[in-house]
């Protein structure tokens, strides 16, 4: 893993992995704590980046979970019996017809 220094100009979307984002979050927490220990106000960019990093971590983790869910559903569907598939389609058809009325 490449060591990265978070700066005010760092774009969190360009940070490669969730692990790197976790390191960035920790780095920002250390900077914030350092300012607080000195009795100084934390720069706005630090607070902003902390929020950006949190959002990006949440987004990426959720995206990965959605991808895994989709894959699992596809695998489960492939294992379904013909009757299960028919029943699932009948349910979906009924829901769609209801929504169209």
Image (tube, rainbow, N blue to C red):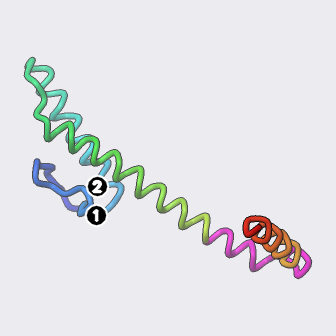
**Location of the C terminus (image quadrant):** bottom right
**For the residue labelled by badge 1, is the local secondary structure a helix, a strand or a loop?**
loop
Answer with left or right where residue 22 lies relative to residue 9.
right
On screen, residue 35 above or below 2: above
In reply to whether residue 76 is colored magenta, the answer given is yes
Distance from the alpha carbon under mark 2 to that under mark 1: 7 Å
In reply to whether residue 58 is colored magenta, the answer given is no
> Dot 2, crowdedness within 10 Å: few (<14), some or many (≥20)?
some
**Residue 46: quarter of image:** top left
Determine which residue is flagged by label 2: 20
Task: Kindly give the residue lying farthest to the front in the view shown.
Answer: 101
> Dot 1, crowdedness within 10 Å: few (<14), some or many (≥20)?
few
**For the residue labelled by badge 2, is the local secondary structure a helix, a strand or a loop?**
helix
Q: Nearer the viewer, residue 91 or 83?
A: 91
**Residue 14: quarter of image:** bottom left
**Could you tell me which residue is drawn at 35 percent across and 48 percent down?**
55
On screen, residue 40 above or below 96: above
For the magenta stretch, what is the residue range?
A: 71-84
Determine which residue is flagged by label 1: 16
């Amino acid at each position: 893993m490449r060591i990265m220094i978070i700066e005010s100009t760092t774009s969190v979307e360009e940070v490669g992995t969730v692990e790197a984002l976790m390191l960035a979050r920790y780095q920002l927490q250390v900077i914030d704590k350092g300012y607080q220990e000195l009795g100084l106000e934390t720069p706005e960019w630090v607070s902003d980046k902390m929020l950006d990093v949190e959002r990006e971590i949440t987004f990426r983790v959720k995206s990965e979970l959605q991808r895994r869910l989709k894959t699992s559903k596809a695998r489960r569907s492939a294992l379904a019996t013909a009757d299960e598939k028919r029943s699932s389609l009948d349910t979906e058809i009924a829901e769609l017809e209801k929504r169209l009325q």
